[in-house]
Image (cartoon, grey):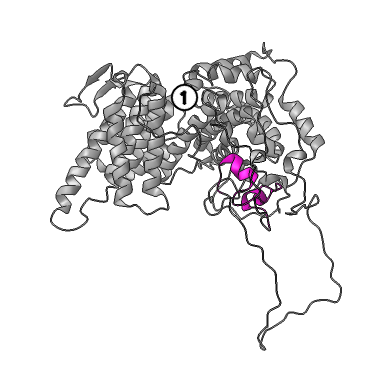
Amino acid sequence: MPSPDPASRSEPHAVAPIGCQNCRDQHLKCDRGTPTCGRCLANGRECIRGYKFRVKTGPFARRQEWIRTPKKLKFVDESTGDFTGDDEESPPAQDQFQDDWQSPSADSRTVSTTDIPVASVVPVPVVQPFPIRPASPTDRFIVHDDLSEQPEVGYPVLTTERRHSVAEINSLRARIYLDQSVYPLRDRQEAILLRHFVEKIAIWLDLCDPVQSFEVTVPSRAGTCSILVNAIFAVAAKHLSHISAFDRYASDRYHQECLDILIPLLSHDATVSDENLFAATIILRVWEEMEVKHSGVDAHSYLLGIHAFVQGHGRYLIPGSLSAACFWVGLRQEIYSATMNQQPVRIHLVHSLVERGLGPADDYTWANRAVVHCADVLNFCFGDKQQTPEWWDDLERWNRQWKERIPASFTPVFERERQTCGAFPEIWYYSSCHVIGVQHHILAELFLVSFDPKIPRIGGQRREAAKRVNERIQNLVRRVCGIGLGNQWTPPSMFTACMAIAAFGDRFLDRADQEAFLDILKRTEKDHARPTEAVQKQMMKSWDWMVEQ
């Protein structure tokens, strides 16, 4: 259903004394309509009114201490441009940049940037907290601080330090989009990197995408999009350097090419309407995950950048588009991070792509429903809202009904219970969407069982209840790992197995089980460059193994 046009409202409305908070935050002109302004009405957002106040002189205590000031004061303007403030009569931000960022590709969709947050077009003070732990060089520019949740303490969350002129933006646009395709590539090594991305890495990203956007659309667009092709080269080189003797510094060079363009671009509001840059950010997040092996820390810079793109795209997340494909990959990346760090899923989950129904649909939709459900469960477990029994009941009911209603196509093509000498059952599927859907459904069930508010915490029934819960969790973890091992042709099946091990592996006391879990973690890192060393050490410590420092 199309959004109502604010201009079509026939009845006269009272005018509020000041613009709404959404428009003020984005530095856009508000029509001050009541009860909802035109922009909020068009975008289906809650129109929040600020408060108009007047500063009055108040009395001071007789013992008030005052500091002495010199007779002459010198004021220094440290900003690099004029600050426009929140003047109600200032022109809308989109008037400053009429042209939207878009790919010259034939299948690109023109999108408006009217309602896209523009936090970074205002000069940002050059002030940042001292980082508690090592940070990525991208930390200071990747995320718009009004588009994400609060970061971890000590992490700088700043956009670029100055506002870029129209001429600079046009110059950068010329660097991003080429008049002529780079294909055929002249450098054979770069051709190898592109082929490696298509053959080995795109399958990680296209799990629940029937049109295989990262295998087909992204390489095609990369021919005329420099930042996209450099992101492909960077992640392919990083992956090859982990699993072979490929030049480990090649990836850094391509990554730097991306940064040189991304840093100034992310200070422009229309950037978040460019789905090619969205795809590049998704790919660079994969690069960032692999980089943990060398840096020792996951700065989550590109993950936070993905939050900005999802928030900025909003109404433009159309099913079947590249933006939609990027969203689903970004959500799975966020779930991986949330599980490993025991935190809520912070990516925006309220838009046209996310549906929590249980009616008839294709297999890809059923798989994505399970992924969204997993995010909902993680938010129940680690979010700020109170964990009410009613909320848990709703999630548990949905989890049970998903399993009851999924199509027959989700039935494994082969299944064998674990043998006496084995740790896991054998479970094979023929589609990656079946694998990822079932695994995320089981992962959600694991957290629901673990956070069941009805489990006795004290009394005579506590021990027996804890035993039943532990047995159920162990069976579910074995199943997730069995699916991973039985479907290694789609590597994310192993990534999800690692998630289950990281969260619940400490519940296994048998040495043979523990060694089987370590084998999965080591194999995943060796074969797919997914850093698991920290999880290995964490598990061995929980099992009271002697761990070398």
Q: Residue 543 lies in what quarter of the image?
A: top left
Seen from this angle, which residue lies furthest left?
460
Please say if 8 is above or below 251: below
- For the stretch drawn in magenta, the main secondary structure is loop
Please say if 152 is above or below 511: below
Q: Residue 445 lies in what quarter of the image?
A: top left
Seen from this angle, which residue lies furthest right?
72
Q: Nearer the viewer, residue 34 or 482?
A: 34
Would you name the residue on which mark 1 appears? 204
Q: Residue at x 53, y 41 (%)?
A: 300
Q: Residue 270 lies in what quarter of the image?
A: top right
Q: Position of residue 368 (x, y in %)?
A: 41, 29
Please say if 36 is above or below 478: below
Q: Nearer the viewer, residue 337 or 519?
A: 337
Q: In the image, is 58 to the left or to the right of 298?
A: right
Q: Nearer the viewer, residue 131 or 158?
A: 158
Q: Position of residue 223 (x, y in %)?
A: 66, 17
Residue 477 appears in the picture as rendered: no
Q: In the image, is 376 to the left or to the right of 473?
A: right
Report the span colored magenta: 18-46
Residue 11 appears in the picture as rendered: yes
Q: Position of residue 273 (x, y in %)?
A: 64, 33
Please say if 546 is above or below 385: above
Seen from this angle, which residue lies furthest bottom?
62
Q: Residue at x 16, y 51 (%)?
A: 463
Q: In the image, is 164 to the left or to the right of 392?
A: right
Q: Nearer the viewer, residue 291 or 89?
A: 89
Report the amino acid beneath label 1: Trp
Q: Position of residue 460 (x, y in %)?
A: 13, 56
For label 1, the crowd category at 10 Å Cα-Cα, with few meaning under 14, some 14 to 19 and many 20 or more, is: some
Q: Is residue 145 magenta?
A: no
